[in-house]
Image: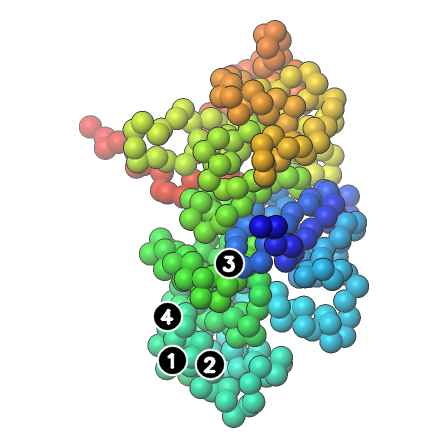
Amino acid sequence: MAALAALLEIAGLEVRFGPVRAVDGVSLDVAPGPFGLGLVGESGSGKSTIGRAVLRLVPAAAGQIRFDGADVAGLSGRELRDYRRAVQIVFQDPDNTLDPRMRVGAAIAEALAAHGIVPRREAGPRVRELLEEVGLDPDFASRYPHQLSGGQRQRVAIARALSVRPRMLVLDEPTSALDVRAQARILELIGSLRAERRLAYLLITHNLAVVSELCEQIAVLYLGRVAESGPTAELLAAPAHPYTRALRSAVPEIAASARSTRIVLHGEPPDATNPPSGCVFHPRCPVAIERCAVESPSLRAIAPGRLVACHRAEEVLAGIEMPERPGTVESGTELSVAGSSDAEPSDAEPSDAVQPGAAQPAPPPKG
């Protein structure tokens, strides 16, 4: 049976903020729901900017975004309004999206009225239905946002997004501002809603464990570019890019047999206003060779349905050993890395490293 046409198509997307290329030639597809595409990477990799560009909240400098076959950049008037109804966003912090002076019920009813979803007299009952659908007491409609917990406010934000019957959601770190129990409940809610409403979504997160549970496909981003993409289970089981492999090694495993050596990436992501030549990851890459410093790798097929931008992808996929120091080549010489010295690198990790999805172990008791 032929594959369904993509609901959302992103081709060669570039987004710039002055000299910064926040997104640099990204191409992605999102299939019709129920379907999830996860975007992961360190802070500053372009994940949220891609989501905002999809909704035309930031302008694209180049490339094309198509939704259900229509060029999003060319939409106006009623067509643009219909698109904004079809694609909704849930932001990281509900406190920045809910009006503190407006009751919860009124905030949801406002969306219903703006898009003419139901007659005004039916707005109240519909609001109560939406609150119940996201696991809240319908009587919360009379409360203000400050009278709810963080998890409850995020559920209200999801209810408002769902109120206009969207076909796709952009979920921008929907659980990162919540405690662990609230996170689990929100993720369970997203999982159930995608099946019930046949939703497609773009899930932006630092948490690989979340992506493995909720997304069929994953795209790993680094400095505004796709490092690797493919089916989630296959990619996380056998990464073909050194960056993905390092991120994957940070996820704790319960089974001792499944545990691997933690790969620590030294240094910080390069300056986006002055990216390095060749592969943008090569200054931090444990397996970089001289070619990596001068030739930018193209995104190419490494297996059915899998793409990777790495000159040594086949070796990484085969399980090449990751040296302790970045830039070590097979001959034993090192690449010249800006800012490097003869001193031993620090073992400290960057503060914006991808979260492994679980708390770090507590320090051993003194004495």
Residue that sits furthest to the left in the current view: 367
Front-most of residues 273 and 3: 3
Where disc 4 sits, the SS reads: loop
- Vertical relation: 174 (above or below) 286: below
Q: Which residue is mark 1?
A: 138
Helix, strand or loop at label 3? It is loop
Query: Along the line of sight, which residue is nearer the eye, 14 or 168?
Result: 168
Pointers 4 and 3 in contact (C-beta within 8 Å)? no
Q: CA–CA distance between discs 4 and 3? A: 20 Å
Q: Earlier in the sequence, mark 4 or mark 3?
A: 3
Could you give the CA–CA distance between mark 1 and mark 3, rounded to whole angstroms? Answer: 27 Å
Residue position marked by numbered label 3 in the rendering: 34
Element assignment for label 1 = helix
Mark 3 or 2, which is nearer the eye? Answer: 3
Q: Nearer the viewer, mark 1 or mark 3?
A: 3
Horizontal and vertical percent for residue 270? 65, 33
